[in-house]
Image (cartoon, rainbow, N blue to C red):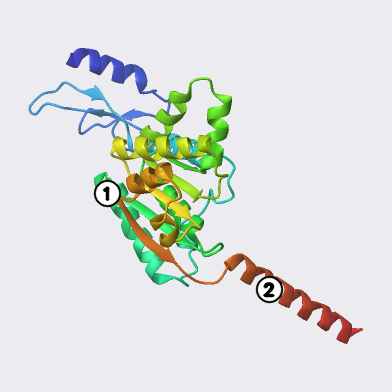
Amino acid sequence: MFDVLATKAEEAIPIRDCDYTDEATGLLMCGKCHTPKQCRPFPNSDEAVYCLCACMKADDDAMRERLRQNEIEQRRNICFHGSDLIRATFADDDGKAASLTETCKAFSERVTGDSSRDWLLLWGDCGTGKSFMAACIANAAIDAGMTARFITVSKIEQHLWNNPDKAAVYDEMNHTGLLVIDDFGCERRTDYMDEIKFNLIDGRLRSGKPCVITTNLTLNDFAAPADLTQKRIVSRMFERATTFHVQGEDRRFTALKERAARSSSSSQATTEEE
């Protein structure tokens, strides 16, 4: 076995014209980085085998890192599927909701650190940063080597409609490392959609994997389900979920007002110059 590996190593290590033999050790040296291309794996033995010199090891490490980054990018594209939150990270957080950030970071660390089965439900008004924080958690999971999906119930319904193998769609949602269900409750209310939601929540719970849910619904909405199907969905969802009330003003509306203010100031300055 050792001879086979030694032969493969020799075939894999290119010999350049600038390479030379070290007089003191008798080992082949790289003419570029001046580190050994041969080593002696056994003490008190003159047998030498080929190995990576420093510059070849650096090239090999760089290639492996490129492959890793390409894989991460592929996972990110699959996760967000065109969403503008694909680059959201905790580093981009504006720090206006410290307790929310702390909660989401702690959840993220548990998920990426010990294969946590936790669920996190972020609820609150529109524009308060729920989806952004959920996307930050998903990106942290991907950067840690996990798979993730960031998706809405309506989008899952589209996948089910277009795929004759319905079980495969649910299997994908259940097998991914982290599932983020965004804008839960915004989908239309029909028996068919309720069935999808129950199958999704129930299957994910049975998978034993973590899940993040964002919703504009309140805890009072969840406490008063309209029918038995809704009650079953809520019961399964809250079996493992920790809830966090995301408060604050609509950041999109705030940004709109700030842009309008800047535009007004710019227009006023232009008028004064004229």
What is the x, y in percent for residue 77? 53, 39
- Front-most of residues 64 and 15: 64
Q: Residue at x 20, y 13 (%)?
A: 3
Please name the residue that numbered disc 1 is placed on: 113
Looking at the image, the residue that sits furthest to the front is 227
User: Compared with residue 264, is residue 194 higher up or lower down, i.e. above or below?
Assistant: above
What element does badge 1 sit on?
helix
Q: Which mark is residue 29?
A: none
Looking at the image, the residue that sits furthest to the left is 44
Kindly tell me whether residue 31 is visible in this rendering.
no
Q: Is residue 17 left or right of residue 256?
A: left
What element does badge 2 sit on?
helix
Q: Residue at x 34, y 29 (%)?
A: 20
Q: Is residue 184 left or right of residue 265?
A: left
User: Compared with residue 138, is residue 171 higher up or lower down, i.e. above or below?
Assistant: above
Q: Quadrant of residue 230?
A: top left
Q: Quadrant of residue 8?
A: top left
* Quadrant the N terminus occupies: top left
Please name the residue that numbered disc 2 is placed on: 257
Type of residue at label 2? Lys
Q: Residue at x 58, y 44 (%)?
A: 188
- Front-most of residues 134 and 120: 120
Q: Residue at x 44, y 70 (%)?
A: 97
User: Compared with residue 207, is residue 124 higher up or lower down, i.e. above or below?
Assistant: below
What is the x, y in percent for residue 154? 56, 40
